[in-house]
Amino acid sequence: MRPTSISSRVEGGAPAPRPPRGAAGDAPSARVWLSGPYVVLLLVALVVPLAHLGAISIFTHHPRLMFVAEPTLENYARLLQPYYLEVLVRTLRIGLVTTLCCMVLGVPLAYWLARCGPTALGIGLFLLVMPMMVSTVVRAFGWMIILGRNGVINQISVGLGFERWLFVMNTETAVVIALVQICLPLLVLPTLASIERIPRSLEEAAANLGASPVQLFRRVILPLAAPGIASGAVLAFLVAIGVVVTPALMGGRGSRMIGNEIYDQLITALNWPFASAMAIALIAIVLGAVIASRAAAAAAERFRREAARRRASAGGA
Amino acid sequence: MSAIDQMRQAVRASLEVRGLTKAYSSEVSVGPISFDVREGEFFSLLGPSGCGKTTTLRCIAGFERPTGGEILLGGARLDTVPAHRRDLGLVFQSHALFPHLTVAENVGFGLSVRKVEAAERRRRVADALALVGLADLGSRWPQQISGGQQQRVALARSLVLRPPLLLLDEPLSSLDLKLRQQMREELRRLQKQLGQTTVFVTHDQTEALAMSDRLAVLSGGRIEQIGTPEQIYRRPTTRFVAGFIGQANILDATIAVRGDDGVAGLRVAGPDGVVLRVRLGEGSGAVPPPGSAAAAVIRPEDVVLGDDGPDAENTFRAQVRDIEYLGEDTQVTLEAPGLPPLLASFKTTRTASARLAARGSGTLRVRIDAADIHLIPG
């Protein structure tokens, strides 16, 4: 994610005021062309298809012609049917649970990685990132082998003389387990980068002032790492709600996510207008989540500063 | 004044470090280091980087686990207590203020983790801020105040807890010269007012000499000498201390004759080495037996130039090799037969400069008082 800040382990200190951009009078307009190739790619590969998608989503489905250019809101109206609302709610629920699990597992891991030696960091990063190089399908099969009805865990239980007890495959839980594995590095890497930027002297100062390890973590590490944790959480959430393969392989009929519905409409039902409407809805949720998290962070910061100011003016502390 | 009286309730304690060692690898290790800090004393650990002073401080603070030895505070074992239960004050070189907390919240951090009740906390934070002269800055953020102010906040944050021992880790070295001198005086004044037992780590000999009641000079992981600033400067016990603290002429020599009352003749090493008369004062120990090696330490300011009086002890004629004008002081490198090059310095007054300028044939009369020559083991 951020290889420079991870590898160079900057002992940087407090968030310093940002240096003014474009020093020494070189116009930023001259450098904007450096982003040219990417802007072209963005236009051709993202903006144009997106506009196309948006257009199709308000066209009318036609069994033979796929769609005809007659504007309608029917596709969006269909999203409000109980079945699709349920899929939408389930998608968001799976996304949130996955993100929370990633935070619980990932933040302590990121802290440990940020403070361990360079050798352990190298090994840890490799172990963390390596699964990302394996296809999602292969990873899902791996989970099936472990969690399945005749999977490793149940076979070991039977071998030890117990009953089969783990019947998690084809449930929402199985989907979350697989998604946590997929999303964990996405949360850990930005968190790790932001914890690395917290000078160790702050931790020592807190300990010296009497903060127990738990207090140190809650009062110093968490607030200072919050921006990294937040961006990692948003990333994990966005990936989790957009998956297709994982719920298809790990989940059952009752744990289909919006990605599965889009896939089915696109490939099986050949209803591109409805598939487009669902895609647009998903994109809207994603954008909404990003905007909401930013607004929440800004509001929290404002509230905190305001509270500190009020406390200070109320009498010194 | 009330703030000071409040803070005076601090538990005073003495510190004992006994045989402290810390091994990093087979080559790099610190110690054994032993010293005592008395109640209310300002004690400095002075030495070049890598001498072990910071390691010693970090062992006292609990950030490093000593390999051996004991640390006692007020007679009780300290080295077995985890860092966050030691209740010591510590001011870092980097100040280490929490960037997400206001000045007042920074100062109140220790009280808040100790669950001190809010009203009491506010009062003590206000007192501590008043003590360091920052009563109005409580609502600022650390990034909004100057380096010197950050330093004071860091100090207030430690003092508000009334620690039995205050540790200062090069707290002044991140400040510029003028501010450093000002903070030096202020720190010392506060320390005296509070009677705060303090251990101060620095590589700056001026700071250490100016502020300390006593100091330990460290080198290569060991203590070279412990004493008052005057003892350290006037009566160094090792070659390292003599060379590290201030400027010194260190002349290798052997004891030629030994008289009574600390008087001795010292033959300077080298061909045709002259014999210097030495008169050791009280507290300088006994003169070693004749024939044993010794080194003479002569401070540049004790080399008197252009003295016109009658030929007394230790008087030579010397060539001026080099003159270095340093503002307040002028430094002169002299060469005299039978002596290695000698560094002399004098206050740059009008008469002294005139005397130097008026040297006739290029030679100058030089005198060293026998009582100004200090002996260290050779």
Image (cartoon, rainbow, N blue to C red):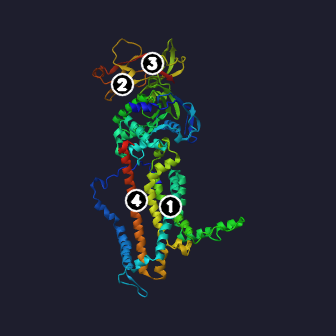
Q: Position of residue A226 (x, y in %)?
A: 44, 55
Circle 2 SS class: strand
Work out which residue is located at the far right of the displayed protein and give it.
A161
Direction from residue B89 to residue B178 in the image, left or right: left
Q: Position of residue B328 (x, y in %)?
A: 32, 27
* Residue indicated by mark 2: B345
Q: Are marks 2 and 4 in contact (CB under 8 Å)?
A: no
Res B122 quadrant in image: top left
Indicate whether B172 appears above or below A175. above
Q: Closer to the camera: disc 1 or disc 2?
A: 1
Mark 1, other Cα within 10 Å: few <14 / some 14–19 / many ≥20? some
Tag 3: Cα neighbours inside 10 Å, few (<14), some, or many (≥20)?
some
Evaluate whether label 3 is on the same chain as label 4.
no
Mark 3 sits on what residue? Answer: B274
Disc 4 residue type?
Ala
Label 1 or label 3, whichever lies nearer to me, is 1
| Residues tagged 3 and 4 counted as in contact (Cβ below 8 A) | no
Q: Residue at x 49, y 14 (%)?
A: B262
Chain under label 3? B
User: Of the residues under marks 3 and 2, which one precedes in the sequence?
Assistant: 3
- In the rendered structure, which amino acid carries the disc numbered 2? Ser
Cα distance, mark 1 to mark 2?
Answer: 72 Å
Q: Is residue A73 above or below residue B246?
A: below
Question: Is A232 located above or below residue B210 in the figure?
Answer: below
- When the figure is inspected, residue B190 is found, relative to residue A117, above or below; the finding is above
Q: Quadrant of the N terminus of chain B?
A: top left
Res B240 seen here: yes
Q: Which mark is residue A100?
A: 1
For badge 3, the amino acid type reads Val
Q: Nearer the viewer, residue B89 or B179?
A: B89
C-alpha distance separating marks 2 and 4: 67 Å
In the picture, the disc for residue A296 is 4
